[in-house]
Image (tube, rainbow, N blue to C red):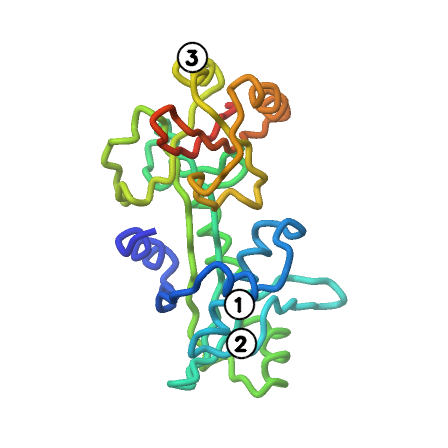
């Protein structure tokens, strides 16, 4: 997301946006640095590994990651990262979030329009969870006790969010200027199955990625299949009220990300 959209997220949460400097890594460096098989991990865990890789190659030091807070033998929450700036010695609590949201114009409130592909979550719900549960967890008595043993004073910790989102709009709104969002933030479009079965889409080639690959740029894909080879898989997903992501390669070698929705 660009600076305009990130500023809005920070404003909604009353938190700063955590931004690392841009690093120049080649693919071999990244693979060696991560040293894991991403296919064995859920997307969220992959991103945590990648975030750790970036931190390891920055001026930040990881004091703790994925810190589970337990009370009466029950896990009440988890802190993503507690970092130390090795230049300023400042301690910072960072929550990371990577989400996929589709724009549903049926909502009157623009911020409520951004929902998950299966309508089970939304941008507003994520903001509420961060503001009401994840960030306040830092000040829970159990958290304070754990960090005190590490020599960390909770009252000296800043809090920030590393928020990344890929946004999708109805095909007819691809060129429309939307509030809070610039065109560069739009990763693709979505459409119902009835529109997907029209002649134009039947003439293109496709790939059905695993969720662990949803962030990948489709132009890097080498395997493409015709429309009919993905249609049955898509129909099966829709019958389970699951909206699959699809990569499309047009006859003109234009690459697109699509969600086919069940709702």
Q: Answer with the quarter of the image where residue 32 lies.
A: bottom right
For the residues labelled 3 and 1, the Cα–Cα distance comes to 44 Å
Which residue is label 3 attached to? 198
Tell me if residue 159 comes above or below residue 28 in the rendering.
Answer: below
Q: Is mark 3 on a helix, strand or loop?
A: loop
Q: Disc 1 on helix, strand or loop? A: helix
Q: Earlier in the sequence, mark 1 or mark 2?
A: 1
The residue drawn where x is 37% and y is 24% is 251
Number of other residues with Cα within 10 Å of mark 2, as a class: few under 14, some 14 to 19, many 20 or more: some
Q: Residue beneath label 2, please?
A: 62
Q: Position of residue 196 (x, y in %)?
A: 45, 18
Closest to the camera, between mark 2 and mark 3, is: 3
The image shows residue 26 at horizontal and vertical percentages of 44, 61
At x 64% / y 52%, what residue is drawn? 41
Figure label count? 3
Could you classify mark 1 by the number of other residues whose Cα lies within 10 Å: few (under 14), some (14-19), or many (20 or more)?
A: some
Disc 3 or 1, which lies upstream in sequence?
Answer: 1
Residue 93 is left or right of residue 169, and the answer is: right
Direction right: furthest residue: 73
Q: How far apart are marks 2 and 3 (CA)?
A: 51 Å
Q: In this view, does 239 lie to the left or right of 30?
A: right
3D distance between C-alphas at marks 1 and 2: 8 Å
| Residue under the image location 38 percent in, 40 percent down | 187
219 or 196, nearer to the observer = 219
To which residue does mark 1 refer? Answer: 52
């Amino acid at each position: 997301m660009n600076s305009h959209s990130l500023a809005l997220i920070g404003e909604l949460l009353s938190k700063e946006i955590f931004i690392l400097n841009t690093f120049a890594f080649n693919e071999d460096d990244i693979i060696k640095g991560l040293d894991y098989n991403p296919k064995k991990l859920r997307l969220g865990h992959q991103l945590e590994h990648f975030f750790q890789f970036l931190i390891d190659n920055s001026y930040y030091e990881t004091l703790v990651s994925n810190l589970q807070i337990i009370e009466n033998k029950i896990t009440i929450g988890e802190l993503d990262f507690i970092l130390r700036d090795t230049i300023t010695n400042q301690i910072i609590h960072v929550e990371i979030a990577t989400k996929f949201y589709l724009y549903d114009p049926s909502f009157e409130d623009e911020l409520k329009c951004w929902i998950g592909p299966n309508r089970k979550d939304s941008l507003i719900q994520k903001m509420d969870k961060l503001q009401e549960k994840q960030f306040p967890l830092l000040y829970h008595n159990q958290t304070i006790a754990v960090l005190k043993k590490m020599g960390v004073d909770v009252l000296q910790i800043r809090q920030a969010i590393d928020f990344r989102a890929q946004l999708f709009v109805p095909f007819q709104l691809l060129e429309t200027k939307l509030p809070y969002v610039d065109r560069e933030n739009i990763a693709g479009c979505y459409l119902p199955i009835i529109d997907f079965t029209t002649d134009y889409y039947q003439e293109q080639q496709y790939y059905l990625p695993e969720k662990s690959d949803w962030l990948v740029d489709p132009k890097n894909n080498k395997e493409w299949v015709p429309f009919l080879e993905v249609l049955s898989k898509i129909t099966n997903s829709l019958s389970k009220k699951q909206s699959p992501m699809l990569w499309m390669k047009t006859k003109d070698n234009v690459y697109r990300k699509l969600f086919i929705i069940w709702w």
